[in-house]
Amino acid sequence: MEGNKRGYELNSNNETFEEYIPRKSKLAFGALNAGNGVLSGIAFSTITFYYNVKLGLAAGFVALAWLLFAIWNTINDPLFGYLQDRTKSKYGRRIPYVRFGAPIIGILFIICWFPFVDRTDEFGLFLNLLIVLLLFDTLFTIIGLIGFSLPAEMAITQKARTEVVTYGVVLGGLALIFSFIIPVFLLTGDKSTKVNPMFLIAMIFIGIICAFIIFISSFFLKENLYTQLEEPLGFKDTIKETIKNKPFLRYEISNFSFLLAQTIFTTGIFYYIDYVLNISGYLTMVPLLLVFLMAFIFTPIFAKLSGKYGLKKVYIFGLAFTGIISISFFFLGWSLLTAIIPLLLLGIGFSALLLLRPAIMADVIDFDETRTGKRRETSYGGMNAVIEKPAVSIANWMFLFVIVYFGFQAKAQTQGFQAKMGIMVALTLIPAIFVLFSAFIMKFFPLDGPEWNKQKSELKRIHYEKEKEYIKHLKEQGKI
């Protein structure tokens, strides 16, 4: 056998090969996901509460900033996805964006928490919020799309790709917990509208550390330059072929509804802990720890169930289960003691959803490849974000609209029963409706059953032919 620096070994027929990805490269991919996940997780889940309650910006202005922000997201995500798919450099097409974008996203994250205007200047504060949302999300989009697409370019075989993705899921999951626990602990429970200085210090350190992690990861990430051998579609054809993918459209209707629910929950949990549970200190971390504890415990269980029953069935179960538990949460969530059971059960539902959403999207992209013959992860990442980002904006607007309608006043240190009722309605019943609707739509998702399995087998043949072409290219370049 012949060895080489990139991790291939040819077998005796000189056509197929065993592929291995260095552990440092897999760790680098996980670190990239974790660093970007912490920054985006904190920013997008915390900034509404921060500007509304801590900085005193009126809910109407916060909601308007989110809606205007959604317009930019309909442009930047597909645009950057298209540009990345057409990038060709000696570093690859993804790595340069990670390396040179890392310090910028760290700086923009820190700026999110230090407005350039006086807190009494409400319109200036509104403009500040809008600008930091636009700038931070632009860098998050650029780096996030790369995390979406890299497994297909770091590895050729499905086995190697799965190993890469596993590192991303594990380290990304830990980052998700961190991104919720820290701001909840430092921003809630003090019965004051003043900003905790420790929160600001923590944001500076987190911005610097995560930017450094993202930057360092770029030196250990590896690309096979696999898809650079393919001629990418033009911008119009990219959008056209994506829209023609019916499974993608059906999934995105369901996904949009689910993201409305998820964003309302991640935004509303700050208001719930501070004003409904009215707890402080380390107790503020308990609700989220309960959810994430069960999510981690049940992840391997749902992984096995999806292998036995299929992604679609288990995903629908997760949605329906989460919707039903959200309704029970409305009745049981008024005190920490009675909220324990529904929070634990919500963690079970979230486990299925967080695990299987990427797998279902991967099936959608596989189906596209059977139609176009091309791997278009980043293009789909961009189009997916066109739908996801407006959902985030609308969800923040919707949550604020509901709680203000019920009488919530951000400048009041305590809220009346009516305002607390509004928080509970927004946090539980409205997400329940969206999640159950999402489950209903997924019933019509077609990529399931024997016919789809047959198409997946055909896709394996396509991948085999691509692998042969790539091996031929490597031999011509003298790399194997």
Image (cartoon, rainbow, N blue to C red):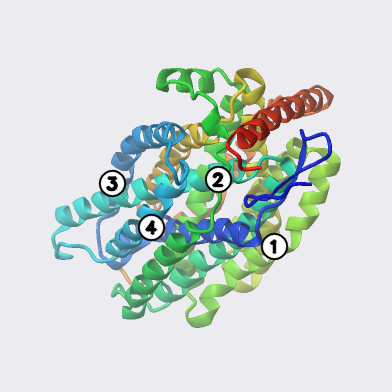
**Separation (CA) of disc 3 from disc 4:** 25 Å
Task: Classify 160 as above or below 291.
Answer: above
The residue singled out by tag 4 in the image is 102
Total marks shown come to 4
Dot 4 falls on a residue whose secondary structure is helix
Q: Which mark is residue 296?
A: 1
Q: Earlier in the sequence, mark 2 or mark 1?
A: 2
Q: Residue at x 59, y 57 (%)?
A: 25
* Image coordinates for residue 322, horizontal then vertical, percent: 66, 49
Which of 376 and 108 lies nearest the eye of the viewer? 376
**Separation (CA) of disc 2 from disc 4:** 18 Å
Dot 3 falls on a residue whose secondary structure is helix
Q: Residues within 10 Å of mark 1 (few under 14, many from 20)?
A: some
Q: Residue at x 69, y 25 (%)?
A: 444
The amino acid sitting under disc 1 is Phe
Q: Residue at x 38, y 75 (%)?
A: 202
Q: Residue at x 31, y 42 (%)?
A: 69
Q: Earlier in the sequence, mark 1 or mark 4?
A: 4
**Separation (CA) of disc 2 from disc 1:** 30 Å
Q: Earlier in the sequence, mark 3 or mark 4?
A: 3
**Separation (CA) of disc 1 from disc 4:** 29 Å
Q: Nearer the viewer, mark 2 or mark 1?
A: 2
Dot 1 falls on a residue whose secondary structure is helix
Which of 22 and 253 lies nearest the eye of the viewer? 22
The amino acid sitting under disc 3 is Ala
The residue singled out by tag 3 in the image is 65
The residue singled out by tag 2 in the image is 223
* Image coordinates for residue 437, horizontal then vertical, percent: 61, 35
